[in-house]
Amino acid sequence: MAAITKCLHQVHETQVESAKQRIARFDRLIDESDKQIDNHTRTHFDGKAKWRTKSKASGSITTATLMAMLPELGRLSHKRIAGLVGIAPHPRESGETKFKSRCFGGRSAVRKALYMAAAAATRFEPLIRDFHQRLLYSELTKTG
């Protein structure tokens, strides 16, 4: 919504007030949806989402997506979960031919939610931000 608010100067002056009212309405709808998601997560997943409060990066959408789309959480190993989500590299070998391992398949909704959480974590979580910077620096020194 912030991006739309910044573009209000492009709207004809007779429509600015109407646009502001619509933006306010959408903000209220987003807040209501967030509250419903939080309430549903708390009531239907028996406290399994308590880990969410430890990180600033994982919000209600990430938690709800993981709880709903990945019921195996807590029952399988982290390697199996990574394979289910599609973020574990799978070797592509046939006979003596060996291709580069790639990440593919899996549950795309979970993968997208985890990507957004990771992107937020690289900005707001100091430990992850530092790790991300080290990875970027090592890639730059390899190619440069």
Image: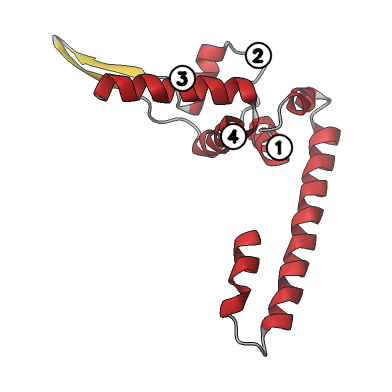
Residue 131 in the image, given as x and y percentages of width and height: 52, 19
Q: Which residue is mark 2?
A: 75
The first of marks 1 and 2 along the sequence is 1
Report whether 99 appears left or right of 67: left
Which residue occupies the foreground of this view, 144 or 63?
144
Residue 119 in the image, given as x and y percentages of width and height: 55, 35
Q: Nearer the viewer, mark 1 or mark 2?
A: 1
Q: Which residue is mark 4?
A: 123
Quarter holding the C terminus? top left
Q: Residue at x 76, y 75 (%)?
A: 21
Occupied quadrant, residue 50: top right
Q: Nearer the viewer, mark 1 or mark 3?
A: 3
The amino acid at mark 3 is Arg
Q: Residue at x 71, y 27 (%)?
A: 55
Q: CA distance from mark 1 to mark 4?
A: 14 Å
Q: Which residue is mark 1?
A: 59
The first of marks 1 and 3 along the sequence is 1
Report whether 76 appears left or right of 67: left
The first of marks 3 and 4 along the sequence is 4
Occupied quadrant, residue 12: bottom right
The amino acid at mark 4 is Arg
Helix, strand or loop at disc 2?
loop
Residue 134, numbered label:
3
Q: Within 10 angstroms of label 2, few (less than 14), some, or many (20 or more) residues?
A: few
